[in-house]
Amino acid sequence: MAEEVILLDFWPSPFAMRAKIALREKGVEFDLREEGLPSNKSPLLLQMNPVHKKIPVLIHNGKPVCESLIIVQYIDETWGHGSPLLPSEPHERAHAKFWADYVDKKITVTQAVWKSTGEAQEAAKKEYIEYLKVLEGELGDKAYFGGERFGYVDVSLIPFYSWFYAFETSANFSTEEECPKLVGWAKRCMLRESVAKSLPDQHKVYHYMLELKKKF
Ligand code: GS8
């Protein structure tokens, strides 16, 4: 039976980018459906994610999977081809999940980096840079977060690279000066087709952010 794989998407969403990267890493064909966020949600989205009403939603043979990190894990477990994103050894697996969870818990600060001004923005920028430095420390001298192979933590974090220029320009700092190794890692990830195809141009994201700012 032919498989039906649909992804409810919104192009600037880093969460949706995670799902696209994972599907492309596994070589899965999928149908991308762009949602009109924030106000123009399709009936399919409301039906498939009635709890949060958020993208991304992966619909596999009619059944929805919600929440980007759960989607990436589902893709890893469902499509065996390609190399695994999560390690199989339980402790290494728990370690990878810890860092992906760290990304999710801390990433909320980025909202204040581009939305706020003055002292509030300075505080948010400081917090954001500290958080990037913690991630850079975890990366260390490894090629990827899991070692030699691109994996789960990389998929979780790399989408935010497409927003780096928007954050930097809003709050006036250079990510590369603050975290050179992390930016080196991001450029390495961008050499992968799965990542390059899934991340929008940083300037396009920046212009999208300017439009959003006008609405606040
Ligand atoms: C976050 C998804 C999300 O915020 C995940 O999938 O990991 N924890 C979730 N989706 C946003 C778009 S990206 O900013 C969304 O769908 N927002 C619509 C809304 O809030 O109404």
Image (tube, rainbow, N blue to C red):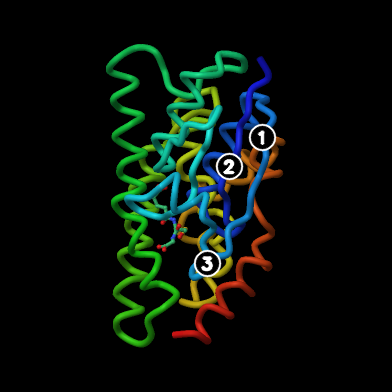
Against 103, residue 112 (above or below) is: below
Which amino acid, by three-letter code, is at mark 3? Ser
Is label 2 within 8 A of ligand 1 (CB to nearest ligand atom)?
no
Residue 156: percent from left, percent from top:
45, 41
Q: Earlier in the sequence, mark 3 or mark 2?
A: 2
Which amino acid, by three-letter code, is at mark 2? Leu
Is label 3 within 8 A of ligand 1 (CB to nearest ligand atom)?
no
Q: Mark 2 points at which residue?
A: 7
- Count of labels shown? 3
Q: Mark 3 points at which residue?
A: 174
Comparing 20 with 2, the one in front is: 2
User: Is label 3 or label 1 in front?
Assistant: 1
Residue 167: percent from left, percent from top:
50, 69
Q: Residue at x 57, y 56 (%)?
A: 10
**Residue 171: image tag:** none
Determine whether label 3 and label 2 are within 8 Å by CB.
no
Determine whether label 1 and label 2 are within 8 Å by CB.
yes
Q: Mark 1 points at which residue?
A: 30
How packed mark 3 is, by other alpha carbons closer than 10 Å (few <14, some 14-19, many 20 or more), is some
Q: Which of marks 1 and 2 is nearer the N terminus?
A: 2
User: Is label 3 or label 2 in front?
Assistant: 2
Q: How far apart are marks 1 and 2 (CA)?
A: 7 Å
